[in-house]
DNA sequence: CGCAATCTATCCCTTTTGGGGTAATTGTTC
DNA sequence: GAACAATTACCCCAAAAGGGATAGATTGCG
């Protein structure tokens, strides 16, 4: 393991953070940063080409986000260990990262020394999770009713589409005009999606959606 | 200006980012980081004590957020130049930062070289804004109807309280029970706050509020 | 082909919401 | 004390939303 320095690739759209991380890593003799990417597309190419020992992947990137990048890397057959490094401690992100093949999930506000320990542990093949994360995972797994996000998957395309419009504050009538269908039909879809999501009103649906949109996309 | 190195204080709850920034700054001979804080409370004390030439302040901190910290610093009579450094390009944040006395607003995903240029310009007494920011500011100022945030200030305490409950998805009846008043009264307050905010339904109010809550507080 | 899912639409009915008004109470300010 | 804002509460009424059922059209799948 420490015969040759372990190779590390950094993927984060904040140059500043990359700089800090790189400097931190460079202080370890048996670690070497061999590549830096500022976006997911780049990361895909470089990961396939360089096959680093460890990829440190930011979750909140513009363009292709971290989860999507992770997913595609695994699809492409990247076998490097991949650790997510992020500010988000949202349940969905954590669960999504782990289920899509991440080998760790660390928070950016960690103590640098601790962070380095975890990175080294990750290269050693261990799964690394921030303390705050482990309990989130545990509680998430305890509830098999998947309160995470995948409820969205049970919705049909039309229902999801209408939910998004509700999350913009639109009334049934406006939605009907927007989608060019009758408002009676919109009511049917709303009725169904409320039932599927276990919510009692469009207001609940709206706040639920807005809160869950936060990391899904951004303006 | 460059007789003695200019003193800089960093306030950010991400140690990694502080590290990167500090290293970047240390490469300039006439700049010196004299303090680092990971939270707003600390920053208040240190700012008063050290009176640095420049304070680089993160906007999204847990506990006291950047805007609040900025506000209190100015209230305390801190005269240092203060530049916000953040990932958020939300209109409200920018306008709030500027109106509360920030001397600049920079984004974390800037190019490091450019960032250093801007920091030096800030110390020279110039107002520095990321490119993407200037147009946001311009358009924000063009609309004097203050679509920013301060609309919240026009609400009474009760109305604001009820708006927050709406933003949790609650119905009038539930809100009435929660506040121990009649649901007819809740309707009155809802009616008023909708009028004040220029919104057409509680759903619009809910999504507006949730979106504006994002940086105000966090779980 | 038959079956299930989806999208569309309508009817009926109850509850909720939003907008208009009046008015009593309290506290604050001039 | 008068004037004012805020909170409470009620009235009325129209519009919107939500829940039930039914049903035609289309599409995809075994």
Image (spheres, coloured by chain):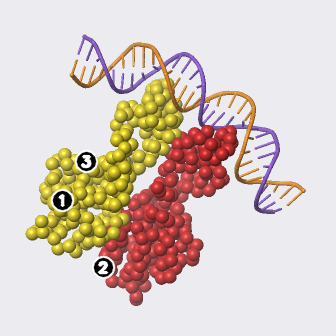
Chain colours: A yellow, B red, C purple, D orange
Q: Mark 1 to mark 2: distance in Å? A: 36 Å
Query: In terms of depth relative to the viewer, which is nearer, B56 or D23?
Result: D23
Farthest residue toward the left?
A3
Q: Residues within 10 Å of mark 2 (few under 14, many from 20)?
A: few
Residue A144: name its quadrant: top left
Q: Residues within 10 Å of mark 1 (few under 14, many from 20)?
A: few
Query: In terms of depth relative to the viewer, which is nearer, A197 or D3?
Result: A197
Q: Identify the subunit bearing mark 3.
A: A
Q: Which residue is mark 1?
A: A125
- The answer to whether B94 is drawn above or below residue A197 in the figure is below
Residue A42, image x and y in percent? 22, 55
Q: Which residue is mark 2?
A: B27
Q: Mark 1 to mark 3: distance in Å? A: 17 Å
The residue at the point 19 percent across, 62 percent down is A123
The residue at the point 26 percent across, 71 percent down is A24
Q: Quadrant of the N terminus of chain A?
A: bottom left
Q: Earlier in the sequence, mark 1 or mark 3?
A: 3
- Mark 3 secondary-structure assignment: loop
Residue A180, image x and y in percent? 44, 28
Residue A59: name its quadrant: bottom left
Tally the marks: 3
Q: Mark 3 to mark 2: distance in Å? A: 40 Å
Q: Which residue is mark 3?
A: A100
The answer to whether residue B52 is seen in the rendering is yes
The residue at the point 17 percent across, 62 percent down is A124
Q: Identify the subunit bearing mark 1.
A: A
Left or right: B162 in relation to A127: right
- Mark 2 secondary-structure assignment: loop
């Amino acid at each position: 393991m420490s015969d040759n320095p372990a190779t590390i690739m950094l993927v984060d759209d904040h140059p500043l953070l990359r700089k800090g991380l790189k400097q931190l890593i460079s202080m370890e003799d048996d670690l070497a940063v061999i590549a830096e990417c500022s976006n997911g597309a780049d990361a895909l190419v470089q990961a396939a080409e360089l096959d680093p020992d460890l990829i440190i992947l930011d979750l909140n990137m513009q363009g292709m986000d971290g989860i999507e990048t992770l997913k595609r890397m695994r699809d492409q057959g990247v076998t490097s260990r991949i650790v997510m490094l992020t500010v988000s401690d949202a349940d969905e992100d954590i669960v999504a990262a782990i289920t899509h093949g991440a080998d760790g999930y660390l928070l950016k506000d960690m103590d640098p020394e601790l962070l380095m320990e975890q990175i080294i542990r990750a290269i050693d093949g261990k799964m690394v999770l921030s303390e705050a994360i482990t309990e989130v995972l545990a509680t998430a797994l305890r509830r098999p009713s998947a309160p995470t996000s995948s409820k969205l998957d049970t919705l049909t395309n039309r229902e999801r589409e209408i939910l998004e419009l509700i999350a913009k504050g639109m009334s049934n009538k406006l939605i009907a005009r927007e989608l060019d269908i009758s408002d009676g039909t919109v009511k049917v879809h709303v009725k169904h999606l409320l039932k599927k999501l276990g919510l009692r009103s469009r207001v609940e649906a709206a706040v639920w959606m807005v809160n869950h949109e936060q990391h899904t996309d951004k303006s």
